[in-house]
Image: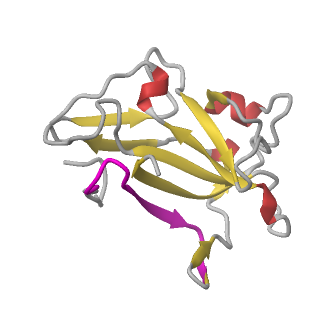
Amino acid sequence: MGLGNGSIEFRAPTSVSKADVEFLAGAVNNFGNFAATQSLGRLGDITQLNYQWRRDSTSTAARHFHPMFRLLVDADGNWGTANDRGGLVFERVYNGGGVVNNAWIAENLLAYQGGVGPNLWSFDAGMATVFGGSSRNLTAWRNGFSGSTISSKSAVIGFSIGVGSG
């Protein structure tokens, strides 16, 4: 029973499995590596950011694991500089929330526990700290902060939902 018109089920066969589903704006296949060629809009234009997940009680993964959400961005919004792409990741375990089995959990990534957005940690194309290597709420990412290249003008290029820890 989801919020919208689609759903996906992940079944990871082992504790070291990883699975993701992504939506990339204007995706092109470059020899098996997919890339976005368009923007869904600016980070500062997001007015709603929600997803819903459910964890089955038969899961053998550690109790804090659940389907995580990644907002994929191009920091400067310039398609000519692809080395500044990455994402902001929501995981409930880093936001003081527990995992409940056999129940749908609705996550509102703009207003979370007490009305403040949850912390989203960052990763970038080089897995370094181009984005600021930090964990902050979406408002802080949009406002920018010292050491971060993300701002309200950053282009949203897609989203990803996945399980596993690679």
**Does the segment drawn in magenta span residue 21?**
yes
Q: Position of residue 54 (x, y in %)?
A: 24, 42
Who's the residue at 72% across and 35% down the image? 133
Above or below — where is 6 with respect to 136?
A: below
Above or below — where is 74 with respect to 61?
A: below
Q: Position of residue 15 (x, y in %)?
A: 32, 47
Disc tally is 0
Please state the extent of the stretch shown in magenta in the rendering.
12-29
Q: Position of residue 116 (x, y in %)?
A: 53, 20
Can residue 46 be seen at all in this image of the molecule? yes
Scheme of image coloration: secondary structure
Q: Quadrant of residue 103?
A: top left
Query: Which residue is most to the bottom?
Result: 31
- Residue 150 shown left or right of residue 123 in the figure: right
Can residue 26 be seen at all in this image of the molecule? no
- Residue 87 shown left or right of residue 116 in the figure: right
Who's the residue at 61% across and 85% down the image? 31
Q: Quadrant of residue 79?
A: bottom right
Above or below — where is 32 with respect to 141?
A: below
Nearest the eye: 111 or 131: 131
Above or below — where is 159 with respect to 134?
A: below
Who's the residue at 58% across and 34% down the image? 120
**Does the segment drawn in magenta span residue 55?**
no
Q: Position of residue 131 (x, y in %)?
A: 76, 42
Nearest the eye: 76 or 41: 76
Who's the residue at 82% across and 53% down the image? 76
